[in-house]
Amino acid sequence: MKVTIIDYGAGNVPSVERALDRLGAKSERTGSPEDISKARVLLLPGVGHYSALVRALDEQNMRAPLVDAIGRGVPFLGICLGLQVLFESSAESPQLRGLSLLLGKVRALPSGVKLPHMGWNQIAANRESRLLAGIDSGAYFYFAHSYAAPDSNGSTAATCFHGISFAAVVEKQNIYGVQFHPEKSGDAGSRLLDNFLRSAA
C-alpha cells in the first residue's frame, strides 16, 4: 500500500513519512492534482495558519481532485489543520471556505487558557472508532494548536478539553481526522496510524 501525502509546504511532512516508514508503509509526497486523483490512500498533515493550507489547495488546483477522491471513497486522514479544513470554515480565516465535508465551523480556543494548546493531553472516546481500536479510551496524545473543531459535529469519535471541549478525533465513513499529531504521540500515535493503514487496506 502506498500513502499519498499532500505536501503544500507544511513543516511536519518528514516526521509523518518516518512514522509511516516505521510501520512498513510506503509513502509519496505530492502537490500534484493528478497524483491526488490517482491516489489509493490520502493523508493531509498540516501545521501553521489555516489560510496557508486553504490557499495552497486552491492555488495548486488540489481542492477539486481531493474532494472528488474522498467522495469516491478513497481513505483520507487529516492531521491537525488537515482535520480543520474538513469543516465549512475557520475563525482563523473566516473569509476562506473549507472543504465542507463535515458540518460545523472551527473556532478559537478560549483566551483564558494557555495558547497555543501545546503538549500532551488526554482524549475521551465517546463511541466505537476504527482509528482508536486497541487504544485506551483516555490515552494521551501530543497537541499543538489554537483553533479546534466543535465536538458536536456528528462525526466526533473522541474529544479533548482545553478551556472547552473540542473534537480530537473525527470519523465518518472513509474520512478520518485527528487534531493531535500522531507522529509525535509515541506508542498510541503509532497504533492509531497503524489502525488507519489497516482500515485503508
Image: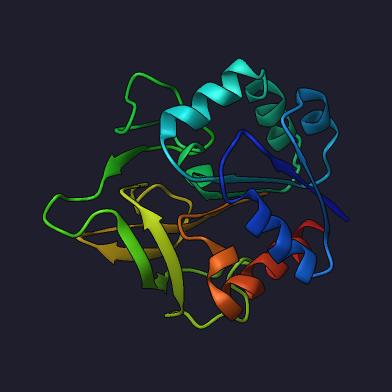
Q: Quadrant of residue 119?
A: bottom left
Q: Position of residue 95 (x, y in %)?
A: 34, 18
Q: Is residue 138 left or right of residue 78?
A: left
Q: Position of residue 118 (x, y in %)?
A: 34, 62
Q: Quadrant of the C terminus?
A: bottom right
Q: Is residue 26 left or right of residue 50?
A: right
Tell me which residue sits at (54%, 35%) in the image. Answer: 101
Tell me which residue sits at (48%, 45%) in the image. Answer: 47
Q: Is residue 52 left or right of residue 191?
A: left
The relative height of residue 44 versus residue 128 in the rendered view (above or below) is: above
What is the count of numbered marks? 0
Q: Quadrant of residue 16?
A: bottom right
Q: Position of residue 112 (x, y in %)?
A: 11, 55
In this picture the colour scheme is rainbow
- Front one among 72 and 15: 15
Seen from this angle, which residue lies furthest left? 112
Q: Quadrant of the N terminus?
A: bottom right
Asked if residue 88 shows in the view, the reply is: no
Tell me which residue sits at (84%, 68%) in the image. Answer: 24
Q: Is residue 97 left or right of residue 94?
A: right
The relative height of residue 66 versus residue 78 in the rendered view (above or below) is: above
The relative height of residue 184 versus residue 27 in the rendered view (above or below) is: below
- Front one among 80 and 100: 80
Tell me which residue sits at (45%, 55%) in the image. Answer: 179
Q: Position of residue 187 (x, y in %)?
A: 60, 80
Asked if residue 118 shows in the view, the reply is: yes
